[in-house]
Amino acid sequence: MSDQIQLTIDAIPVTVPAGTTVFDAARMNGIAIPTLCHQQNETPVGVCRVCVVEAGGRVLTASCVRPAENGMKVSTNSEKVRGARRTLLELLMADHPSPCARQRQSNDCELEHLATLEGVTAPRYPRRLSPRGQDDSSLVIAVDHEACILCDRCIRGCDEIRHNDVLGRRGKGFNAGIAFDLNNPMGNSDCVSCGECMVSCPTGALTNKSVVRTVLPGEPVEAEELKQLHYFEKVSGTFLELNKNAVVRRHFRKGEVVCREGEYGSTAFYILEGTAHVFLSAPMAHVQTGGGATGLFSKLTSRLAGRQQDRREGENERRKIPIDASVDLPYDNPVAELGPGDLFGEMTCMSLYPRSATVQAATDCVMFEMLRNVLDIMQRNKTLKAQLDANYRKRALDDHLRSVPIFSSLTEEFIDSLRDRVELVRYNKGDMICHQGDIADAFYLIRIGFVKVSEVYPDDDLVLAYLGRGGYFGEIGLLGEGRRTATCTALDHVEVVRIHGEDFHRMMEEFPDVRQSLELVAQAHLEQNQQRMAVTSNVPLNQFLTQGLMEAQSLLILDLEKCTRCDNCVRACADAHDGVTRLIREGLRFDKYLVATSCRQCRDPLCMVGCPVGSIRRRNSLEVIIEDWCIGCGLCARNCPYGNINMHPFTVMVDSPESPGRRMAAIKQKATSCDLCTEHAEPSCVYACPHDAAHRVDPTKFFSAVLQQTVTGT
Amino acid sequence: MIFDDLRAIQSQYGYLPAEQLEALSKKTGTPLYRIHGVADFYPHFHLSPPPKVRANICTDMSCHLRGADALRMGLKQHFRGMSEREVSVGEVSCLGQCDGAPAVSINDHIYRNVNSLQAEALVLTALGGSQMPEMPHEEKKTGLAPDPYRNSPQYGAVRQYVRTKDWDGMIAQLKASGLPGLGGAGFPTGIKWEAVRNAPGPEKYVVCNADESEPGTIKDRFIMEHLPHLVIEGMILAGLVTGAKRGIFYLRHEYEAQEKTLEAEIHRCYAEGLLGADILGSGLAFDLEMFISPGGYICGEETALIEAIEGKRAEPRNKPPFPVTHGVWNKPTALNNVETFANVPQILMNGVDWYKAQGQGGAAGWKFVGVSGDVRNPGVFIIPMGTPMSEVLYNHAGGIIDGKKLKGFAPSGPSSGYLPASMVDVRLDFKSLAAIGSMLGSGAIVVCAEGRCMLDMALNAVKFFRNESCGKCVPCRMGSQKMVDILTSWTFGEGSRSDLKLLDELSEAMKLTSICGLGQFAHAPLTSVLEHFRAEVEAHVLEHRCPEGVCPMRDARASTGTFKVPTGAFKVPTGTFKVSTGMFAILKTRPE
């Protein structure tokens, strides 16, 4: 075979090197053959058939895969070829959601363009009836299977170019489609968000999720420069280009504040150079309401008190405060240091929670500030993930384990032995981490995000708890009958530390005191659950449930037949709490009773979701308690559907961030909820009612009594 | 081997649980997408827990003619109270039992000539967890005309050629005989084997395509059952002449009985030194292994079959290059149909002149044809190539059922299209059928009696192609579905004149641009009925009525307005259904 091939293309004699495809031979000679599935950087597969040409023979041949042969006579644009091509485009357009996402975003859907060029405007074929669906699970890439033409460009991009080996074909025939791993949602697959599939896609089947609305302050980072960093090694350049504004380089001078606790944000930071201090500026205290004064009503005052001064029942013993970074802060001196290679603000970035701590540059610093699509790309990078995991294992695992009070006695050696054996696992919003009834094979510590723990009841699920960073679950199953007693679901982006069952049991053997306290906790849990079960099965009317009244452990009710709307109760509450009332005389009515809003200690305590420092939680009595390290961000107050959590401002002295060392007055808030005026025999509001209309009652007993009356007519 | 791993998991769990696939991926280093890609492609594998009873009824051509739709709907109706996890009633593509239509697969046990009472009883048996009855094994036929070893020891050709080593002579004989590829394409075997022989490199393969899956095609099943030694000898000879050391027998998984027959034959060959590292002491080597297909008509396409052997999704390759140079693992491969291999010993033992003399009307050799559909005596017949169709239908197959007249016939299943009764004198050979715009194909004769709606038959055939399209290329994936959509609308009386032009364009584009024969011939059933039964089709499209009263026709002019179940097609031959549980003792044939 000679090295040069001679053929004619559209009657033009052409000479090309042996092995050249007809498509390339035409292109080299200025003849553009239209195509959808072929890209110069990928192995040709010849599946769209749009590039067919006449080259002798019974049928047309796909020029992208057909090697040029000596003496071949090729026509790229005969009537036969154009007719076939038009039909192919018409078939594809018949099912195409025109204009597709790509066409809308950037006006460059290759299919729609080609169809317009070939005069295919209104496809005459019936439209597909069975929907193919969308996949919204990835943070950075939107998948619209409806727009997929199965050109395999993304598949080759993923498997051939990037070697990520995630994308393939699923199904067969008309039901074929693209699939990630075992046909998982993209966000749950091993996809590293490199973006190659998206930039390969000719249509709107894979497009960039545009989160870039906010313009970040700082200098934009060029895609070329990012590609030099090994975190972005495998990421497609075009993809970085598209997400260019989602990551910026920021310089902070020594002493400058990077972010403040309680502020809302949507970015995470990655430290390139320098060190930074992370600390809490809010006072370590809770709102204490005390008596002392005299009068018709016992006038109370509120002040801030730390747990040394005011021990509350059920208060946490933990010595570490979990924050949104790779370190925890000690209770007594909540300050830590972050250095190059540390990432912080992940929860804020992924799930838009308030900042959990203040970060201040300790030296001149250089950081990347990024939006969550870039954070997602980085976190899915195996190199970076390994580094973050290593950082975590090295620095935070001890703190994290020991911050759980019952684990405080674990020895250094034991934690060392766990270091390489624990697994860090990510879950997306809505993922089930473990299911009630499953075999219990691991113990989990939450590193990031919130987990809902719920039990399945005949009619509905009962939420037992919301666990945040530092929370743990899975011990009851491991200690008990070996089955999961509750279902744990990720409420947002969750990362957990998974300790294997065998390691957990080893821990139980080596540390009997840990075992003992865990068993006590587990037993208490079980008893509580049984009680709850009894309560739930006694509820007489669905109405209560729908009104949410039965959610409450205890209710303030006003007998409307006696109440004169004098508002003495509200005033008494305000008087008792430094002028900030925790009671609003409005609410739902049941029979002749008004249920006034004050904390109902709900069964589904939404207030606990999202607390960036995990300072709001339940006591064993199920009442809500707000721990000393509340940073006053106000999220719980906004989350409470009944408006029962209030923000209480205090003036405190803090270090001036501008001139270190100087103290200045600042207003800090603390969240509080109705405390039932535990200082007194009776709540102030009840005590203050001159008409005996206000009562604090146990809803189950109270309503069953009321119900009995209504039913029997007595 | 990925299919072996998947089969092992499936036999343990009944399906392929995701955790097991993840473990398999870790163990073998195969990416998950690839495992899922094949598991989701082949009908043999299930990604979700199967129901307790999976009753699948073949609804393709011959079974369609013999009342499969009524059987399926009746069964579905009967078990409608059961959840999908207990009983699922579905469709399955041709099971290769067209002479025993309708055929049913219940939990992968295949039954022939099933009526609704039997089907219900079988489902109940499976539901109760009892031992499923077995179909009686076909008695082995001996002394068949094409067998050159009726009076001499088998494997004579192998014995002769390992002695003489006259490979050029063998090629010359095959070329002189003009032996065409009998899988349907008709490519001259001598030329193919010579190309593989001349292809460079030490690693070559011989592959037997026994994936026979086209509706109506049952002849390979017959050959493997009754003449397995000829097929295996043909493969050994191919190995010897091409220099291939390995042979792969690619068999469809539904042919379990034939698998046993072939395995026994291969075992015997190894025992007698006809296979192995040193064939009959000649120093020549050839090993033969079975490869059980994970299923799908597309696997019969030669390059798709090769992809399947390589453990991938059976998606046909772009050609050129052809398998003779780039076959299994991209090595030169002689890939032929069962019948082609079986012909080789005949030619080499009896000579070219004998071979040519066996045919009629200028054609050469014997042809195995399967006749099914509306004939009295469906089955496989051995006829001289070139025998007129009328002789096959009336002499061999006993004529049309119930004394009816012939309306049309497909000489080779869906891909040959339908011919009218007026063409019944056509000779069955490659040239004669090609001359009238059809093809000999795989000799899968499907017969339609009067009263059949040819549009309904065309739709049934196009549906088969739609169901079996691999989905790799646009024209076949999209075109076959759109064609089904439009034809279905015609059967409901919703067609218009513009559809006729649209389908002409679609047929042309599918023929010209599809990667493989499936897509290229998917239009044939439609094109042929438009050519030969145009008035009947136009009555549907333009007048919105079905002349035979078969199609559902929503329009008031269609008079019936409801789906008319074809009646009279349920004649169940007695005596062939062996009852092993006593369950059927009370069952008689369905009252007509």
Image (tube, rainbow, N blue to C red):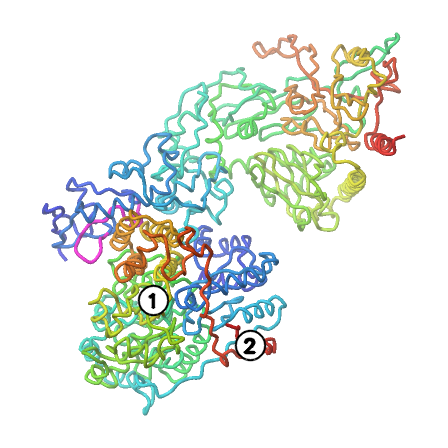
Above or below, B201 relative to A3: below
Q: Earlier in the sequence, mark 1 or mark 2?
A: 1
Residue at the image position 37 percent from the left and 58 percent from the top = B546
Q: How many marks?
A: 2
Give the amino acid type for the residue marked by disc 1 in the picture: Gly
Drawn side of residue A630 relative to residue B488, left or right: right
Describe the element under mark 1 as helix, strand or loop.
helix
Which residue occupies the foreground of this view, B87 or B455? B455
Give the amino acid type for the residue marked by disc 2 in the picture: Lys
Which residue occupies the foreground of this view, B508 or B328? B508
Instruction: Give coordinates of residue A147: x percent, y percent.
Output: 39, 40
Q: Main secondary structure of the magenta part?
A: loop
Instruction: Give coordinates of residue B343: x percent, y percent.
Output: 28, 78
Q: Label 1 vs label 2: CA separation? A: 32 Å
Instruction: Give coordinates of residue A377: x percent, y percent.
Output: 46, 35
Residue B588, numbered circle: 2
Q: Nearer the viewer, mark 1 or mark 2?
A: 2
Q: From this viewpoint, is residue A517 visible?
A: no
Which residue occupies the foreground of this view, B519 or B174? B519
Please give the chain letter of the residue carrying mark 2: B
Magenta region: which residues?
A42-61
Q: Quadrant of the N terminus of chain B?
A: bottom left
Q: Is residue A52 magenta?
A: yes
Residue A696 found in image quarter = top right
Please name the residue that numbered disc 1 is placed on: B413
Drawn side of residue A297 relative to residue A379, left or right: right
Q: Is residue B448 magenta?
A: no
